[in-house]
Image (spheres, rainbow, N blue to C red):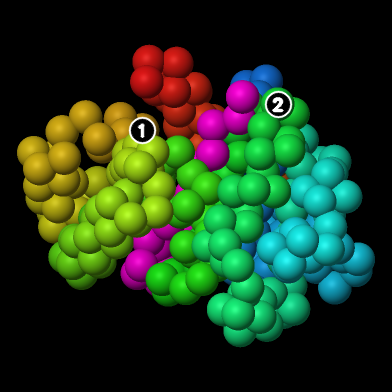
């Protein structure tokens, strides 16, 4: 049965999409069957997996409106080794259309139940706002992976996210929990980053992943080539860190 995880943070620009596509590629590299779902109308995770969002006939939009199944709408990202349920601008309209529909926050969960046996991991790239799309992701997930920079404002954003997860856990999805915090864009030379990292570890304990993703130019360049860094330059420090993170994820799930 697939383990479903949202990659979420209510603060923008913290590397959610970079984390999602590189973790998906890392998990595929260590032999896992992976589905990556893009729930952001910008479609960056789709494009960053080598799938052209403009040419998609079916997207996650069709799945949410129940006009297509996950199997019909998913595309294989051949170079990356995982399947993609893509998104494009159409998805922005789903926000409005879903409001009037029954079970609007559980539509993704229902659709994913049909393919639960086909994958080991399902990773969902959520938009930064708490929208109907993010709610669909959180309602279908077993847990949340939180990528965060070790900076002061990131701690404030984390408080908001923890409160959101508590609300969803209490009202809509009793399975939902924070799986772990991933420190990204980390530069050990900056004293503040080390201090925030220590604060995180003392406050959240083993919820903080051991793997740390360093600030890395090759990871930043990779999206312009339409690939995750793990595929674009496997030898880069950031890429190796994501493969290490994928291995840690597999271990953590085994012990859950």
Q: Which is nearer the eye, 156 or 79?
A: 156
Give the residue at mark 2: 117
The secondary structure type at the circle numbered 2 is loop
| In magenta stretch: residue 221 | no
Is 256 rendered above or below residue 105? above
Highlighted magenta segment, given as a residue range: 1-21
The residue that appears at 8% across and 38% down in the rendered structure is 202
Indicate the position of residue 106 as horizontal and vertical percent values: 56, 56
Residue 89 falls in which quadrant of the image?
A: bottom right
The foreground one among 15 and 89 is 89
Question: Is label 1 in a helix, a strand or a loop?
Answer: strand
Residue 78 sits above or below residue 40 on the image: above
Q: Residue at x 32, y 49 (%)?
A: 169
The answer for how far apart the CA atoms under marks 1 and 2 are is 28 Å
Q: Residue 219 — which label?
A: none
Q: Position of residue 22 (x, y in %)?
A: 58, 44
**Which of label 1 and label 2 is nearer to you?**
2
Left or right of 179 in this view: 89: right
Q: Judge the density around disc 1: few (<14), some (14-19), many (≥20) Cα neighbours within 10 Å.
A: some
Q: Which residue is mark 1?
A: 211
Q: Is residue 85 left or right of residue 45?
A: right
- Residue 12 in the image: x percent, y percent? 40, 71
């Amino acid at each position: 049965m697939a383990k479903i995880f949202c990659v979420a943070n209510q603060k923008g620009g913290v590397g959610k999409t970079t984390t999602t596509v590189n973790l998906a590629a890392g998990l595929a590299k260590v032999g896992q069957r992976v589905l990556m779902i893009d729930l952001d109308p910008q479609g960056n995770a789709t494009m960053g997996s080598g799938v052209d969002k403009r040419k998609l006939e079916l997207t996650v939009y069709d799945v949410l409106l129940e006009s297509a199944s996950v199997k019909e709408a998913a595309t294989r990202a051949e170079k990356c080794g995982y399947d993609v349920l893509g998104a494009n601008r159409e998805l922005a309209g789903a926000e409005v259309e879903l409001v009037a529909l029954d079970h609007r926050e559980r539509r993704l969960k229902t659709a994913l139940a049909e393919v639960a046996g086909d994958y080991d991991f399902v990773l969902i790239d959520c938009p930064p706002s708490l929208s109907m799309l993010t709610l669909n992701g959180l309602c279908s997930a077993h847990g949340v992976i939180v990528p965060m920079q070790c900076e002061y404002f990131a701690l404030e954003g984390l408080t908001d996210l923890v409160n959101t997860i508590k609300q969803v856990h209490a009202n809509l999805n009793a399975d939902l929990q924070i799986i772990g915090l991933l420190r990204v864009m980390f530069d050990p030379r900056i004293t503040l980053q080390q201090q925030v990292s220590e604060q995180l570890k003392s406050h959240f304990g083993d919820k903080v992943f051991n793997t740390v993703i360093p600030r890395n130019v090759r990871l930043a360049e990779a999206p312009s080539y339409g690939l995750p860094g793990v595929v674009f330059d496997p030898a880069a420090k950031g890429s190796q860190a994501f493969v290490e993170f994928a291995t840690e994820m597999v271990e953590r799930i085994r012990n859950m």
